[in-house]
Amino acid sequence: MAKPKKTDLSELKDISIKNPEKIKVGLVVAEWNEEITSTLQQGATDTLLHYGFDKDNLKAIRVPGSYELPMGARSLLKHDKFSAIICLGCVIKGETPHNDYINQAVSTGLTQLSLTSGTPCIFGVLTPLNMDQALDRAGGKHGNKGIEAAVAAVSMIKLNQELEKKSRSIGF
């Protein structure tokens, strides 16, 4: 018999990082669909605290909508040295293809910002077809994608810590 498909992917992984209490992490949260994004933010924050991050080293800012997440992340990076930026939003499909344009712009913007800054900017944007799907992914039957975004951030911080120990031999 086939193994049942896992529907809640929001589980904490066994990740150990060096001095999490000293590491700064930024959170950029879209105000649009605040019912969803505030739940994502709470999941991300609780997850970071679980891993030993100090609440005083978590800097959260709000931006009007998901489209503004890359600019919010850039503003945070100009403000201070962060080891990761978690960007949280929710773009519901609706009646027009606006969601395609917004989601593409946000993912491209965060990718470019991550590559140019050297700081992981995590894409924690829900892209559901309707509000029920959004609720399912913001603490509902499919977990909380804010948790998953925070786990991704912690994983990238760990990777960067591990790579810092190795010598640079190819000119980067």
Image (tube, rainbow, N blue to C red):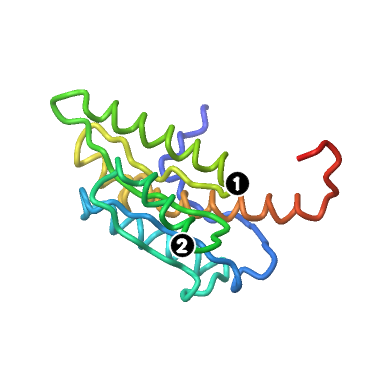
Nearest the camera: 18 or 59? Answer: 59
Q: Residue at x 44, y 42 (%)?
A: 123
Q: In this view, does 152 lie to the left or right of 167?
A: left
Q: Residues within 10 Å of mark 2 (few under 14, many from 20)?
A: few
Where's residue 45, x and y in %? 42, 64
Q: Where is residue 58 in the image (x, y as percent from the top left)?
A: 46, 68
The answer to whether 131 appears left or right of 61 in the picture is left
Identify whether 120 is placed above or below 95: below
With respect to residue 4, does 165 lie above or below? below
Residue closer to the observer: 70 or 138: 70
Seen at 49% across and 36% down, the residue is 111
Give the number of the disc on residue 38: none
Amino acid under disc 1: Gly
Residues tagged 2 and 1 counted as in contact (Cβ below 8 A): no
Nearer to us: label 2 or label 1 = 2
Judging by the rendered image, the residue that carries numbered circle 2 is 79
Horizontal and vertical percent position of residue 108: 43, 32
Q: Is disc 2 placed on a helix, strand or loop?
A: helix
Q: Measure how far apart labels 2 and 1 are at the Cα level.
A: 15 Å
Q: How crowded is mark 1: few (under 14 residues within 10 Å), some or many (20 or more)?
A: few
Q: Which quarter of the figure has residue 105? A: top left
Q: Which amino acid does label 2 sit on?
A: His
Q: State which tag comes first along the sequence, 2 or 1.
A: 2
> What residue do we see at 47% from left, 49% from top?
148
For disc 1, the marked residue is: 118
- In terms of image quadrants, where is residue 127? top left
Q: What element carries label 1?
A: loop
Please name whichever residue, 154 or 139, is drawn nearer the observer in this view of the structure.
Answer: 154
Seen at 25% across and 46% down, the residue is: 65
Q: Residue furthest front?
A: 78
